[in-house]
Amino acid sequence: MKRTIFLVISTLIMGNLHAQKKIETSQPKLFQKLVVDVGAVPLSTSFGNPQMTSYIFSLGYQVIKRLDVRLNLDLFNVFDKNREVNSSSNYCERLFGLSLGLGYSALKGKGDTFFKNTNLGFVGKFGAGIISESREQESLFFDISARAHISTIPYIGLGINHQMYFSTIEPDLTSLYLAFGIDF
């Protein structure tokens, strides 16, 4: 009886091993999971007097097929649009932003259609703004943007950035912006 049960179980296990269809995984290799993003924000409008432009550099890692985690380095140029360049007060303040963020690809084009290289993604980040001259933390910020990749051209994005300053002299700055860049 024990021998019959053993033979039945062994046959089922051995038969099941060969009957399973081999599933080929298309997991990218380690270097294919790295995400690099380089961009610029040349146009923005702020709710208040100061204006902002920025340059973006991000390095990330693809956690799953549509989601990546990023470490971002931003160079913010915050300038007063009502002051003259030659005035004695500060016309432009430079902040380095160091932040942690997520990138998510919501929609991807299919197969051999016109939209095969089209992608709509979202990027969110939260970090600290540091004054470049004194190396002191000046603000906390969050940034949310939607980015569209159309064919093989660089992305075009719309986003919102909110700087929360620690000083009582400068008000918080919220900017709506247009971004351009490449990522791979």
Image (spheres, helix red, strand yellow):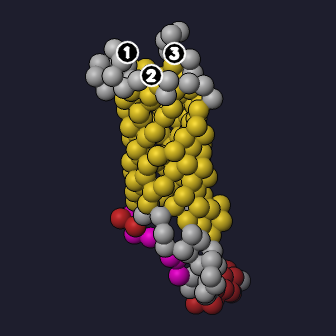
Labels 3 and 2: the sequence-earlier one = 2
| Mark 2 burial class by Cα count in 10 Å: few <14, some 14-19, many 20+ | some
Q: Which mark is residue 41?
A: none
Q: Position of residue 7 (x, y in %)?
A: 64, 87
As helix, strand or loop, the secondary structure at mark 3 comes to loop
Tally of numbered tags:
3
Query: What's the magenta bit mostly, secondary-structure-wise?
Result: loop
Q: Which residue is mark 2?
A: 83
The Cα–Cα distance between marks 3 and 1, rounded to whole angstroms, is 14 Å
177 vs 165, nearest the viewer:
177
Residue 176 among magenta residues: no
Labels 2 and 1: the sequence-earlier one = 2
Q: Which mark is residue 89?
A: 1
> Magenta segment, which residues?
24-30
Q: Which residue is mark 3?
A: 170
- Picture quadrant of residue 90: top left
Name the amino acid type tagged 3.
Glu
Image point 60% across, 87% down: which residue? 112
147 vs 107, nearest the viewer:
147
Residue 133 shows in the view? yes
- Picture quadrant of residue 61: bottom left
Labels 3 and 1: the sequence-earlier one = 1
Image point 51% across, 45% down: which residue? 43
Residue 60 shows in the view? no
4 vs 118, nearest the viewer:
118
The relative height of residue 144 versus residue 14 in the rendered view (above or below) is: above
